[in-house]
Image (cartoon, rainbow, N blue to C red):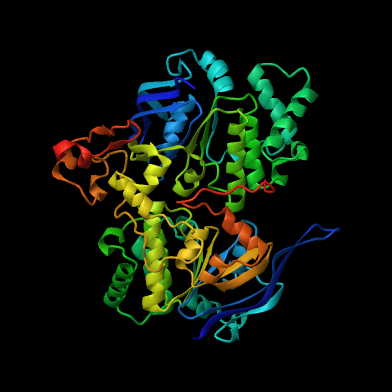
Amino acid sequence: MAGALLEVENLKGYYRGAFGVVHGVDGVTLTLEGGEVVGLAGESGCGKSTLAELVSGSPPRNLYYEGGRIIVDGFEIYKIDPEILRKEVQCKRMSYVPQASMESLNPVKRIRKFLLDVMEERIGEKPKNEEEVVKMAAEHFKKLGLEPWVLDRYPFELSGGMKQRVVIGISTLWNPKLLIVDEPTSALDVVSQKRMIKALMDLKEEGIIQSILFISHDISTLRQICDRCVVMYAGKIVETGSMEDIISSPLHPYTQGLISSIVSYEPGKRRRGRYIKSIPGEHPDLRNPPPGCRFHPRCPYAMEVCKTEVPPVIISEKGKREVSCWLYSRGGK
Amino acid sequence: MMEALECQSITKIYTSGLIRKKMIFGAKNVSFRIRRSEIVGLVGESGSGKTTVARMILRLIEPTSGDILLDGESIFSYDMHDYYRRVQGVFQDPYSACNPFYRIDRILHKALNLVSNNLSSAEKNDLIRSTLKAVMLNPDEVLGRFPHQLSGGQMQRILVARALLVGSELLLADEPTSMIDASTRAGILNLLLDLKENRGLSILFITHDIGQAQYLSDRILVMNKGEVVEEGATDEIFSRPKHSYTKKLLASAPRLYEKWEWEPEEV
């Protein structure tokens, strides 16, 4: 697959309200090639979901697009007409599944009716052959491990994992190239979490979707599905690299701290003692982000330069690894 | 080692419907013991009855049958005041467990007043400050603030401090870290380990996160559909799981250094 499916360049998005300006996403550049599964990691409040909302083209009202470019499969989504954006991008090329979207099913309608409503909204008129649409959906749901009877149930009759798969199923009905999923597994327990991820991987294997931008705070979940990982902190990207590299040799001090704070299950004998460490301090308030490197108040290696100047993005020789930290700039400046 | 708490085949049945009664077992013949200075991990998927057990121990709901003993006496024979002095809970959402209009010092003073009215206010302040230090909080930073001004990790520590202030011996921690970020979660887990070792606190740690259960617990209980399907020492359970459900649960846990193996019969 040649060409990037999603290009984000120096994107800025701020929340404006009575409480001040929150620099939610502040200069983010990232690309996603066709066929890639990219994980977006970081703690709550770091701007992961804000980035996804901006890319989706329909940010919430208090989130303002402040500059930069987002190109989805050739369409620059904040330049084109909203109607084209809706028809060509949101209804064809990209699907965005927001956080807690399993609660977005209509509680008083059967899944079948809800599905037809979504179809009507998409094609602009009532589907002529309703039975056919439902049949097609049933076929599609099978790939997600959902039985056809699910279509005749109300949302409250389904478990959380099933509802989540129904939402993913409906949002991938028209084979979008890009699927953005925001924390699809965080409300699920481990067993349904695994099933969910398997469903996503199957969709990709079947060619229904090409690429996934998978947002999660849980790196061990991202590990299971992603090729590449992007780590965000305080509205900026701190490190990008292949999933293996990020886990086995994290470069940025924040990523290092994040990896060493994870308790994941290890089969067999556990390690003794307190081997996990937390990162001291708190995530900064993005109304007033710290100058220089945003991680410097919590960083164990903070130098003078970190406090005043924004660190450069250093791209490793293979071009696969990017880290934004003064530690790796030549001579430390 | 002494037992702190013993559950004797407790069962909770929820009934629904007026004419055609439908019975659901929230918990079915659950028996286990928690010793002094021991962390027992209770794991299982959602709906397996973990929280039902915790709520029964906290006397929020009454078991349909069976008994729970604290120091050999049924917990229902204790005076509520005395009971909650010894058994306290820490939950998922720390903000919902505190009055949002009270400052932290008032929240802690109110808890302390429940147990000791004969201390002078200077002594009370000292006690609060030293307890806050025991949970690794800086008293100057948190006292005088409102709950919404503190982070989730800090609030969870406040709740642990409040439980310590009233002198509880048993802490029920129901998913205490699920709302807290990975980068600060480690601190909470290490704090629970410290309290167990230094203060002899017994903890029932309820979670669906296998990794955390393995990190903290001395013993593990695995629940499925209201029943305890497997019980044993942590290393034993995690290296040689016997029950098929435990095996399935362990196979589903995401690991940092390994990818899942996909078995065809799943999904």
Q: Please give left or right for residue B99 compared with residue B55 in the image.
A: left
**Residue B248 image point, x, y percent:** 63, 57
Would residue A309 be seen by someone viewing this image from the given angle? yes
Nearest the eye: A120 or A171: A171
**Residue B27 image point, x, y percent:** 68, 67
Q: Indicate whether B132 appears above or below A203.
A: below
Please report the residue visible at 31 percent of the width from the left and 43 percent of the height from the top. Answer: A285
Please report the residue visible at 52 percent of the width from the left and 58 percent of the height from the top. Answer: B209
Q: Please give left or right for residue A145 compared with residue B170 in the image.
A: right
The mark total stands at 0
Nearest the eye: A164 or B115: A164
Location of the C terminus of chain A (image quadrant): top left
Would residue B110 be seen by someone viewing this image from the given angle? no
Q: Residue B21 appears in which quarter of the rendering?
A: bottom right
Residue extending farthest right: B19
Q: Indicate whether A317 appears above or below A274.
A: above
Nearest the eye: A211 or B127: A211
**Residue B129 image point, x, y percent:** 29, 70
Nearest the eye: B110 or B178: B178
Q: Please give left or right for residue A77 compared with residue A287 in the image.
A: right
Q: Please give left or right for residue B218 compared with residue B246 in the image.
A: left
Q: Indicate whether B13 appears above or below A75.
A: below
**Residue B120 image point, x, y percent:** 30, 79
Q: Indicate whether A293 appears above or below B124.
A: above
Q: Residue A4 appears in which quarter of the rendering?
A: top left
Q: Residue A303 appears in which quarter of the rendering?
A: top left
